[in-house]
Image (cartoon, helix red, strand yellow):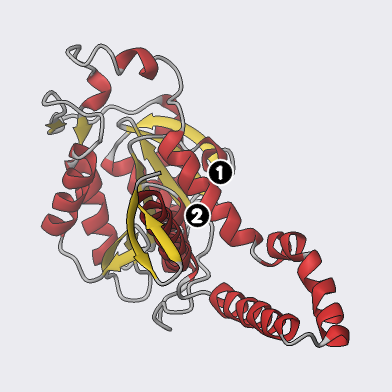
Amino acid sequence: MILLFKIGFLDISWLDILDILAVSFFMYQLYKLMHGSVAIKIFLGVLSLYLFYLVVKAAQMELLASILGQFMSVGVLATIILFQQEIRKFLLVIGKSTSFKSGDSFFRSFAIWKKNEDDLFVVSPVIDAIKAMSGTKTGALIVFTRDSELKFYVDSGDLIDAEISNRLLLAIFNKYSPLHDGAVIIYKNRIRAARCILPVSENDNLPAQFGLRHRAAVGMSEITDTLIVIVSEETGEMSVAEHGEVTHNLSGMEIRQRIIEYLTTHPESTDETKLEEPQDKEEATPEAEAIIAYTEQAEKSA
């Protein structure tokens, strides 16, 4: 062990400095994970109790130290119970950064020179639908994912697996549609599912005017590497949530730019990643046409 310097009777080495930096980084990440939630107050309370226990033990107050020691002995179990949501988020953050992609993506990581049609994304139908829903104050929640198909959340809704279409998005979020209550998940240029249930954020620092739709978007962006577009049902305002942060009152051009930036900054993407403009004629699967037809019929009957 190489000695760096001494402080009194303490011998400080490079390994000690590395150890301190690693612990500091871990504590900072832990603070960011719990910041703004009720868990930070519980964490500070547990930390204060532990420090008080150390003082009592050092003062040799046997009875009080024995009582507090009983709480400390079950500290790991109590931590799991109290911080189960935060531990789950932490494991999800680790899992999404180390997960293996499904299918042939493992082989695509070696064949980076091979062009993949899945990298082509049609932006204009999404933007047109979002602007139309904003004009009519139709609430919408659209999740864009580039790394994972989010199977857990896709399974919580109704599977569609259709090509992106302006008419289909408007039909899904139409107030007469049985699919409008929930989120749409878009992956690999396809609408994977609708009416999906998203996790609601527990961040206490969110503005009071945020409804369930905005909180669900923030919660989803906190635990997954996704971009969520929100259209407010009350004001028609268009917003974007990413990494637990919400950007308000965006224009259609600004949302287009955010989507393009998100999809083209894939950590494994190559220069062949492109954004493709749609053809004049939109194609839809029979399932998508059925949704559109059902919604149009419901509007006529209303």
Task: Give the side of residue 193 with respect to residue 39, left or right.
Answer: left
| Amino acid marked by disc 2 | Gly
Q: Secondary structure at mark 1?
A: loop
* Residue 8, percent from left and from top: 41, 72
Q: Which mark is residue 157?
A: 1
* Residue 2, percent from left and from top: 35, 46
* Residue 239, percent from left and from top: 28, 64
The answer to the question of whether label 1 and label 2 lie on touching residues, with beta carbons closer than 8 A, is yes
Q: Which mark is residue 182?
A: 2
The correct choice, above or below, for 224 with respect to 200 in the image is above
Q: Nearer the viewer, residue 47 or 238?
A: 47
Task: Give the side of residue 194 with respect to residue 136, left or right.
Answer: right
| Amino acid marked by disc 1 | Gly
Which residue is located at x 80 percent, y 64 percent?
Answer: 74
Which residue is located at x 43 percent, y 30 percent?
Answer: 161
The correct choice, above or below, for 232 with respect to 158 in the image is below
